[in-house]
Image: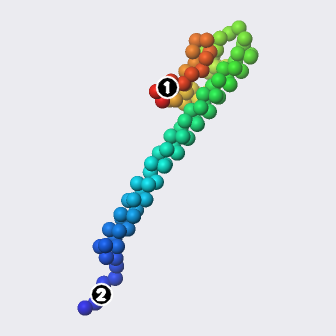
Amino acid sequence: MKRREGFTLIEVVTTLFIIGLLTLLILPNLYRIRDIADQRQAKAMEQTVRSQVELFRLEYPNNPPNLDKLISGRYLNEQQVDRMRHLGINISKDGEVARSSSR
């Protein structure tokens, strides 16, 4: 009888088990790293908006900042405004920048 070349069922099952085990160990770390990166990005965006509000206040001390004024004055662009909304960053009537805690 000729012997066939290839892998046995045990070898294939063992390999699949090891790959599955490695996946289970790696995925939680990837999600944790992604969450940390998202939090840092949100903080950076919040700081950017605060800086732009301060620049507006320096140039127009008697004019309270709001989102429309920041956009029309080119302190913020549409991409930044979209990102602000996505992250839950708001500018209050008195010009304070805050992020909603639900995000």
User: Residue 49 occupies which quadrant of the picture?
Assistant: top right
Measuring from the top left, give residue 32's x and y in whole percent.
Answer: 49, 44
Q: Residue at x 40, y 54 (%)?
A: 24
Instruction: Judge whether residue 67 can be spotted in this image.
Output: no
What secondary structure is marked by label 2?
loop
**63 above or below 35?**
above
Amino acid type at image mark 2: Arg
Is 23 on the left or on the right of 34, as rendered?
Answer: left
Measuring from the top left, give residue 103's x and y in whole percent.
Answer: 48, 30
Label 1 neighbour load within 10 Å: few <14, some 14-19, many 20+ = few
User: Which residue is at the front of the view, 78 or 8?
Assistant: 8
- Furthest-bottom residue in view? 1
What secondary structure is marked by label 1?
loop
How far separated are the C-alphas under marks 2 and 1? 66 Å
Measuring from the top left, give residue 7's x and y in whole percent.
Answer: 34, 76
Amino acid type at image mark 1: Ser
Measuring from the top left, give residue 39's x and y in whole percent.
Answer: 55, 36
For residue 101, the mark is: 1
Is 62 on the left or on the right of 43, as rendered?
Answer: right
Residue corresponding to mark 2: 3
- Furthest-top residue in view? 62
Q: Residue at x 57, y 22 (%)?
A: 98
Q: Residue at x 36, y 65 (%)?
A: 16
User: Mark 1 or mark 2, which is nearer the start of the sequence?
Assistant: 2
For residue 90, the mark is: none
**1 above or below 103?**
below
Nearer to us of marks 2 and 1 is 1
Where's the N terminus, which quadrant?
A: bottom left
User: Residue 78 occupies which quadrant of the picture?
Assistant: top right
Q: Residue at x 61, y 12 (%)?
A: 94
Q: How is the image coloured?
A: rainbow
